[in-house]
Every structure is written in structure tokens, then in C-alpha cells.
Amino acid sequence: METIRDAALDRPTPALALGYDTVLRAIRSTAITADTKTVGAETTVNMSVCKGTSEVMKALSIDQSVSILGLGSVDEKMAFVQKQKTTEQSVSIVVHASHQTGTQTAANPTLDPSLHGQATGDFVRAYGDSYVDSISWGGEYYAMYTFYSETAEESRDLTLSLKASGIVDGMQASASMDTKISSFASTTAIDWSFDQKVSGANTAMPGREGIIDFALKFPALPLDAPVVVAYTTAGYEHVAKFDIDFATIVANRSCLLDPTTGLIGALGKVTSLQNAADRLQAIYRCYGYTVDTALQGFEDALATDVAAIKACVAAYAGDPTAKVVPPPLPSLSRGTPTLDFASHFACWGGPGGDPFDFGDVRTAVRNQQRLVWLQLHGQKYVDAILLQYRSVRGKSGVVKHGGDGGVAQNGVNLDDDEYVQIINTRADVYCDNVWMQTTRNQITQVGDQGGTAAGWTVPADGTVVLGFQGRASRFLDQLGVVTMRLQPAKFV
């Protein structure tokens, strides 16, 4: 029996006993009659820690063969999962609340007498390979954090860190978990995303700090816009006295849709690799990196393998009785592309003051962090430097490093493709003078002529300035520049 969630079937709205093609995700004509049984309301609230896409789909009660993997139309829940761009190594916290107001099931199915002995291909094209044997109505709420670990080791370490924070797969959802989850997300070095969705009820969703509390209360909310939240199908081969030869159809269904051995499982892996490559390409675009031809070739190979799998589906649509032959999928032998780069740090000035740190460079690059604004304050010395960054989470606040004296110089707004390029300094115990120029020839300068002069220019090899760190108190004691140069992805 196959579970299909939240309007995964094509329109019109599914009816009990309606025919269905599980490979093509399409409603067909009715081939059976059945008795109807009605079951009462059911509510569930679950919290899961999932690795990869397949575990996320299981946590959200989505059938493994649904269109999220590219074999049909995309409904809201499947689009939600697709939007998260999970990979084989990503780890997700999934909160799922379901309130089913009622379920109808088909009992004692009987084949229409006029269809006995019909040719297999004609029957499947008209009536599908299965029929809808249950439908549930109600509403759902689901929320999801996805942490984008890159390697199996990083994924294991992340899962252990979640466990150390009291966040474990399968544990009972309680309001206290909200604080643990939001705290973990705020402190982890792994880049992450958050999203949530509600159906069946016209109600505002919570902030990410209150998702567990909202999920626990969801079953009690009035469902003023109920939807079909679940239904299942059963193969015609299970119908009593079904006399149409279905052996090849069952074998083809398994070859295509079995989540472990079928092409759908392979397609899930290919899709995961596409998501990993897409994340790298987004980083490359952020920093203007265009020379990883191997990654582009890998993406082309992935697209070729997806096309090969879809060609099998198209062949099945043309003749469902022909044996499906799985194609070779060479992209799956390459491994997973992961971020690679070289970083460098240069500094000028003395050892006084308190340190201020740029942070972990790998985390910054994965979050597409870049400097978007800076300002120097000073007079005889450089009194302070003010910095603002932007990442996939938006702009940071402006942070000042140094004292309150000096004269504020012109602020420098850096465009998306603009970076600090040249830094000239004079420094000894303090930074006496700092002069900066960007790749678009914006210039800012402050300070006097004390200290020893030094000049620095970004290497012309793709290196970019990510930001600054150093030491500061009353003045800017030391200024350090943090740079990064992307390199072709490593496959692990």
C-alpha cells in the first residue's frame, strides 16, 4: 500500500475507488466498486531529526515516489520539501502536527465485470495500476530547520551536537524544546535555513522560537478550510478475482518506485547531488567565481542521468507492459561536491587593546557573507572602524571596533561585486593611518603620519576581502584583513 499526501494526485479532487497511475501520478477512470467505511478523527504531533531527503519525507508522511523527485505535479507539501534543498548529508529538525477530522476507506473492492480479461496495456492506460482506497480530511502544520552539513563526518558531528543539546530523533515534543532548538540554531557554525507551512486552518504561523508550542496547540485549532491531507492507493492485483495479467506491471512499478532498489531511490540521490552543486554555485555567484569547470561538467552529468530516468518513465507511459530496464547512472559514482578554498590573514599595528574576531571563515563563505559597508573614525590615530556584513540571513547590525573619538569619515557602501582592493597603513603601537580603495575606486582614509608605512594589495588570483579583525580599545590598535580564494570543489 502506498501513502500519497496532501493532494499529490492530479485534479479533480480524488474520490474513493477512483483509478490511479502510481508511476505517472495521474487519476484514471474507475474500475472497481467498493463498500465505504468511515473512521473518526485522529491527531498526531511529532518531532524528528532527519538525515537526507528520504527521512524528511518519511517524517512528513510523504510517499517516497512522489513528485518532489520529479515524476509529476508538485503539491504544496512536496514543494515545501523541495524548497529546502536538502542533500544526502544535511540534517533537518522536522516538526509535524496533523489533525485528521475523518477518514474514508474502501472495503471489499470488486472489479467491474465488463473489464474481466481486458488486455493489460489497455487496462492500465484507462484505469491505472491502482485505486484510491482511503481519503483523510483535516489540516496540517509542519516546520523545518535544515542544517547543511557537507560530509558524512560533519553530519555525524552535527547529530551528536544536537543530542548533547537535548534534541534527539523521536523524542516527545514539548514546549521546552523551542528554546533548545532556537538556541542551537543561534550558536551552531553550520549554515541553516528555516521554513514552515500550515494547511486547513486560516491562522497566523509563529516565529521560529515558538514552533513546538504552536504544533502542540494545532490539533485544537478550528479547521475552517479543511483539505485532503492524506490518501492511500492499493494495487489492482490485490482485488479478489482480478484476472488481468499484472505481473509485468507489478515488476515495473517496483523497478521504478521502490524507495530502496528502484529508480526513484537513485533519482533521490541524484537530486540530492544537484542540491549540493546548486549550493556551491550560489556561493560561486556571490564571490564572482567562474572557473570550476569540473563542477559544471558534473551538473551536466547529473542532468543527463535525470533525463535517463525520466525516459524510463516516458517509456512506461507509452507501453506499461514492456519491461523497464534501469539505465546506467554514472554521476552517482563521483561522490559529493564540497566547498574548497584558501584563506589568508594579514595585520598591521600593535598588541594592545581587546581582540575582535572575524569568525570562522568556512562558515562565513558557506553563508555567503560579505562586507557591505565600512567607515573609519580618527584624527591623529585611527580611533575606530565600523563594519557591516550581509549573508544569506540578511544584513548584520553595524559593529564598531575602537573608541568614541576622532572624526567620522565617509562611509563606503560596497556593491554586490565590489570589494576592498588596496590597504595602505602606517602603524606602530596603534594604527596611525589607514587608507583603503575598493575595486570600484572608492577611497576612504583617516589618521596622521606616525608609525611605519606598509602597503597591501589583494592578489590578482581571485582572492577577495571577506572582512576585518584585529585589536581595539580607545583606538584601533591593530587591523587585520581576512581574505579568501575559492578553488574547484572537492568530491568526497
Image (cartoon, rainbow, N blue to C red):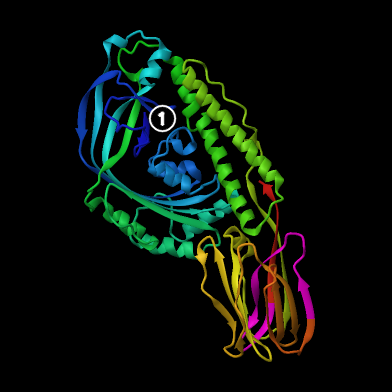
Seen in the image, is 177 located left or right of residue 490? left
Seen in the image, is 472 located left or right of residue 314? right
Residue designated by label 1: 25
Q: From where the camera sits, is residue 103 visible? A: yes
Q: From where the camera sits, is residue 45 visible? A: no
On screen, 103 above or below 452?
above
Q: Residue furthest top?
A: 117
Name the residue: 70% across, 83% down: 351
Crowd band around label 1 with a 10 angstrom C-alpha radius: few (<14), some (14–19), many (20+): some
**Tag 1: residue type?**
Arg
Q: Is residue 89 magenta?
A: no
Seen in the image, is 276 located left or right of residue 171? right
On screen, 60 above or below 355?
above
Q: Which residues are magenta?
A: 454-479
State the image quarter where residue 111 is shown. top left
Name the residue: 43% across, 27% down: 24
Image location of residue 239, percent across then percent down: 31, 18
Name the residue: 57% across, 33% down: 306
Q: Secondary structure at mark 1?
A: loop
Image location of residue 209, percent across then percent down: 38, 63
Quarter of the image where the N terminus is located: top left
For the residue pair 82 and 186, the one nearer the viewer reads as 82
Q: Main secondary structure of the magenta part?
A: strand
For the residue pair 456 and 181, the one nearer the viewer reads as 456
Image location of residue 8, percent across then percent down: 37, 36
State the image quarter where residue 233 is shown. top left
